[in-house]
Amino acid sequence: MMYDKHGNRPTKGARSIDYDDTVLIAKCGPIKFHHWARETADPDTWSEPETDWHREWKTYFHKDNVEKSIEVDGIKHRMDARMYVGGVRHAIEFQHSPISVEEIQQREAGYVNMVWIFDCIGKEMPSNHVGDGIIRIWWKRPRTSILWCNQPVLLDIGDAGVYQLISMPEYENDFWYGRHCHKREMIETLTSGTFSQSTKALEQLIKEGAA
């Protein structure tokens, strides 16, 4: 994780505490992003091992909007990040590891309003334009559980940008449809809660998915 209970970033040799007062140890090597590691397992059942992909996304947000906890059915869960649209909080989940349909449904029910960002860097996802700014995506080995997402889905494809999914296939071997935008434009939208012409698709998806 990027921040301790008090909102501090790790420094070499430092120790601190997490939101549940578990001891944190600073990890400040020369290669990976500096981060905190817990001495014991995280009680948040929705957490997953963090990668530098997670940490890089978190660095784009103000610390007040990263790793904030909410309580669902008596259990604290930590949002990766959050954004506000029209005063409404939307959790943002950065998903690198495989995730089951059950886990997707649990998080969507718990967070109520949220946006998924899936790590698709390096995946075979050729696409072509079909008109009106819409692209058709052929995802050769898709994460089929994504088909069960009812909240907005973004696919991070690395330097090439971000896909905003507007239609998912009925079957996994069919086409996905979306709109493309540059990553920097999507970061600006997610961190400010305002939308540009390139991120209008996400704005519409949020409106359609809002509880």
Image (cartoon, rainbow, N blue to C red):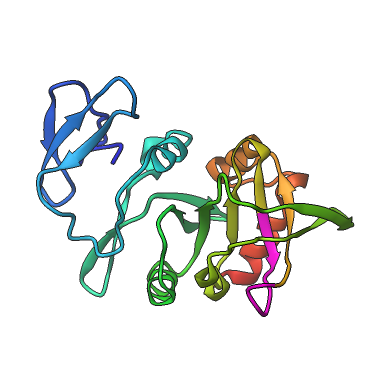
Rendered position, 103 above or below 199: below
Observer-nearest of 208 and 165: 165
Relative to residue 13, is residue 173 drawn left or right? right
Rendered position, 56 above or below 113: above
Question: Quadrant of residue 183 in the image?
Answer: top right
- The quarter in which the N terminus is drawn is top left
Relative to residue 30, is residue 159 drawn left or right? right
Rendered position, 105 above or below 60: below
Observer-nearest of 156 and 7: 156
Q: Position of residue 13 (x, y in %)?
A: 13, 22
Asked if residue 18 lies in the magenta stretch, the reply is no
The residue drawn where x is 70% and y is 49% is: 199
Question: Quadrant of residue 62 in the image?
Answer: top left
Q: Can residue 7 be seen in this view?
A: yes
The residue drawn where x is 63% and y is 74% is: 172
Q: Position of residue 171 (x, y in %)?
A: 65, 78
Q: How many numbered marks are there?
A: 0
Q: Where is residue 38 in the image (x, y as percent from the top left)?
A: 15, 44
Characterize the magenta stretch by its predominant secondary structure. loop
Q: Where is residue 120 in the image (x, y as percent from the top left)?
A: 55, 50
Span shown in magenta: 164-173
Residue extending furthest toward the right? 131
Q: Is residue 6 visible?
A: no
Observer-nearest of 93 and 68: 93
